[in-house]
Structures are given as C-alpha cells and as structure tokens.
Amino acid sequence: MNALMYLAFALLPLDNFPFMFGGAYKPVSLILIVLYFALHLPALLRLRFQRKEVWAFVILVSAALISALLGKEHGYASAGLSDAVFSLAAGIVIYLSFKIFMDMNQEKPDAVLVLFRWMLRGYWLAVGIGLLQLVYIYAVPSGALRSLIGFFVHRDAYVTTGRLHFTFSEPSYIGLHTNLLLFPAYLVLSKYGRLAKADKILVVLFVLLSLLSLSIRYYIDLLFFLLAYLVVTSTAKTFPLLMLKLALIGAVFLVGLNTIFVRNVFHLNSDHYYRILHIYEDPASLANDNSFSIRSTYSQLGLASFLDRPLLGYGLGNFHYGYLDNQDLIPAKTLEENEELRQAKTTLVLPQYNMYTRFLSEFGLPGILLFLTLLALIVQGHRGNFPRLIVILLLYALLQFDSFAFIQVLFWVAFLQHPFVSRLGIGKGEDPAAIGGNRDEKNLRHRPVSAPRPWAVQSAGDADPLPGVQRKIRIDLR
C-alpha cells in the first residue's frame, strides 16, 4: 500500500487546505498518512526502536504528565495543553508511519526513489495555483478566480495585497517547502539520473514565481539553502572556489533585489513591496519591522520564561502564561504598534515561531535533553554529505516553526536513519563510494529504479563496506 504514502507526498503542497482542521498549518496529507498508519498497524508490532527513540518518547510522555500537574497546580486553562497533546499525538503517528514505510522498504530503493519523485512532482499543483495567483494579481482580479484559488488554500487574502504564495498558508512558508522537500527531492533524483526535463522546468518555474512572494524570510531561506549546499559539497581543496561562489551568489542576490525592488521591473505596488524596499534601503529599520518584532519578542519572552522556570518550564502549550509573566519586557512602542502582541494577552494557544524557545519555555531542562536526544538520532551513522545538508536545514527550520506535527521535520528524522539517505553523497566532488562502495558512478546513476540496494554494492578490496546494511536492520534495545 505504498500508493497512499506516495499520494500523501504528492499533496504536501496543500498545507493550508480549506477543508482541513487546524490553524495556519492544515496539511491535507495528514489524513492520508494516518490512513496509511491504520492500514499498517500490525507492522508496528514488528518495528524495533533505538534507545534514543525510546528516550525521546519517555521525555515527551513525562512532559505531558508534568504539564497536566502544573496546570492543575497553577489553575491554567486546558486549551494550550489539549492543543499541544493533540499535535504531539499527530506527530507521533506521522513519525511511526514513516518508520513503517522505511522498514517495509528497507531493501527496496526503487520505492524510496518513487517517493521522492512524487514529492517533487506534487509541486506542479502549487505552480498551477501560483500561475492563477499571478493572473489575479497582474491581469484579472476577478471574484471567480479568487474563489478558485480559495478552494486550494484557506488564507487567500495575500493575493489581494499582491503577494504570491502558491498553495501554502502564507508566503513565508515557501522556504519550508523548498528547503526541506522540493530541493532535496531534486538532488536525490538528480544523483540517480531520474530527473525528467519536466522536473527541471518545474523547479525553475517554481523559483521564478516564488520571487514574487515578497517575503523577506523566504529570500533569506533561499540564500541559506544555497550557502549550506556550497559548504557541504566543498572540500579543503575547493575552498578558494567556494569563496568565489559565495561572492558570486552574494552579487547575484543583490542584483536581484535591486532589479525587483529598486528598479521595480514588475511594477509592484503594495504595502509589502514598500516595506521591503524601505528595509533594503535602510537595513537598520529591520529592528522596527512589525513581523520581525513579533518573532523576536516571542523568542525573547520564551527565553525569559525558561529562566523563570528552568527545571520543568510552564508546561506543554502554556507559553501564554509565560508571556503574561514577562510582558513587561516588551517596549511600550513595540506593543502599541503590534496588534498580534496585544491580542496575545488573551490568546490561550500562543505560538512562538521558534522551536528552540518552545522546548525551553514549555519543557524546561527536559526540553534540552529532548533536543539533544533527537539531534543524536539524526546525526548518527552518516557517510554521505547529503544527510549533513539535511541536518543543517532542519536545525535552521526549527528557528521558524514550532509545531509538534511538522511533517517535513518528522519525515527527515525517520528517513535519515535509512541507509539510502544516510549514505547519499551529492556534488561533483563527492566520492561515489560514500553512497555504497560502487566507484562506477555512471553505472549507479543509470541503474534501473527497481535495482536492489545500490548502496550495498561492494567495491574492490572492501570485504563489507557497510556492515549490516545488506540485511534488514533491526536494532534491539539492550
């Protein structure tokens, strides 16, 4: 029943589907992933878990129980804890679904390649809606067209302000898709020679359209991905070339900003355009930008909440009370200019937009232990540079998103344990042996998708280049 998982990944671009429950993050793929889990429930009994996974689960369950006791002791409303527990339960189901898929396809690289192919090509749907938004913004702003767009994305008001955001909740979410799904899928398929011409056209179209999102955060995300890719694919010998590439990227980035915002070749005329233009011309004004102020304020108060209660935190979902206890740290001018910060005083389920401060403020010291446990889980046993790139991108993404059920993050936490991913090397300078001991890169790239275990092919002189990979991996708890 891999088809359900393939379909779920093809529909990942629909992360704000109008007919789904949830807030800003409403991925329709969650339904298909849960259905996959239900149909493969017996396979759960055959799974083996690492100690790190068990410890992470114990910490999460303990945190939920402690949060319930803290809420009762301090008289907290249950809304925050209920939301956090529901999100956490969904996240556990998502992770277990990926573990089941990974276990059932441990010796089937073709299934993994097909998954990445569906992941990539699902973004044709996003591009299609993006083109409709382009027509609405610059040609025909009709109610019928907006209704059609609204069938695929709930928060469709951005198009009325001249901002393109595909099928995502908001323009700033674009980087969470490019950096953690679209670009990685492109790299994997490219490594194995499985990119069709249409796939390359898709990525080019997507990137070009995404520049019209007018999202500072996305532009930073795009630049960060390029820098991270160059760093992980470079070696000591290519360091001078790396510096040249970085300088070139910086120059292209500045030229692009100048072309879009200063010369205004697209004739943009919206409040957000002038906001970015103002920041571009006066970078110091970023400190007074409303969006930046909201995110930095939540992070500041999250850290202050941890310092208030470093041992156990405020409890899952209870950042609202940490916010109230530390609201005197917010400058009066910042509070006056930001309606969201004023409304936060009465919002029981309060986001932080930062997973690190959420771990600290809601978990306390166990949050640090949980983070270190998960970090150890995703960095172990890597031989290729592709998993290193993914780890960097994951750590960066957690600065911007604080959901316990974030599908992209849970996918990589599970799949970084798969030998297909953990042994994968990218870039021209990567040794083909790093992904399985086969030094004939051409043969590897053009091997049929259904070929068995390309990472397990031994190179000359290697008795067992990847011990344990040629048989099903079962890690017992001892």
Image (cartoon, rainbow, N blue to C red):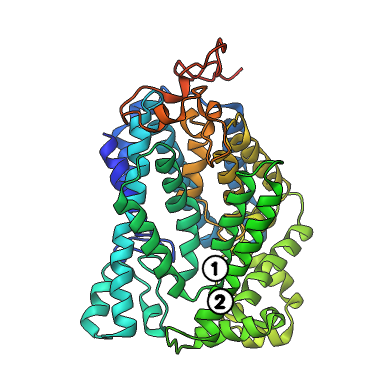
**Kind of element beneath mark 2:** helix
Q: Is residue 22 above or below residue 328?
A: above
Is residue 93 at all visible to an observer of this figure?
A: no
Task: Where is residue 237? Give x, y as percent.
Answer: 70, 41
* Mark earlier in primary sequence (1, 2): 1
The residue at the far left in this view is 144
Pointer 1: what residue? 219
Q: Which image quadrant is residue 110 in?
A: top left
Pointer 2: what residue? 257
Q: Residue at x 59, y 32 (%)?
A: 382
Q: Residue at x 52, y 40 (%)?
A: 426
Q: Residue at x 60, y 73 (%)?
A: 254
The amino acid sitting under disc 2 is Leu
Q: Residue at x 36, y 50 (%)?
A: 120
Q: Is residue 249 above or below residue 12?
A: below
Q: Are marks 1 and 2 in contact (CB under 8 Å)?
A: yes
Is residue 287 at all visible to an observer of this figure?
A: yes
The numbered disc on residue 168 is: none
Q: Nearer the viewer, mark 1 or mark 2?
A: 2
The amino acid sitting under disc 1 is Tyr
User: Which quadrant of the figure contains the C terminus?
Assistant: top right
Q: On the picture, is 472 further left or further right than 320?
A: left
Task: Where is residue 272? Give x, y as percent.
Answer: 51, 83
Q: Is residue 318 above or below residue 213?
A: above
Task: Where is residue 409? Give x, y as percent.
Answer: 51, 48
Label 1: few (<14), some (14–19) or many (≥20) C-alpha neighbours in 10 Å: some
Q: On the picture, is 281 further left or further right than 13?
A: right
Q: On the picture, is 282 further left or further right than 8?
A: right
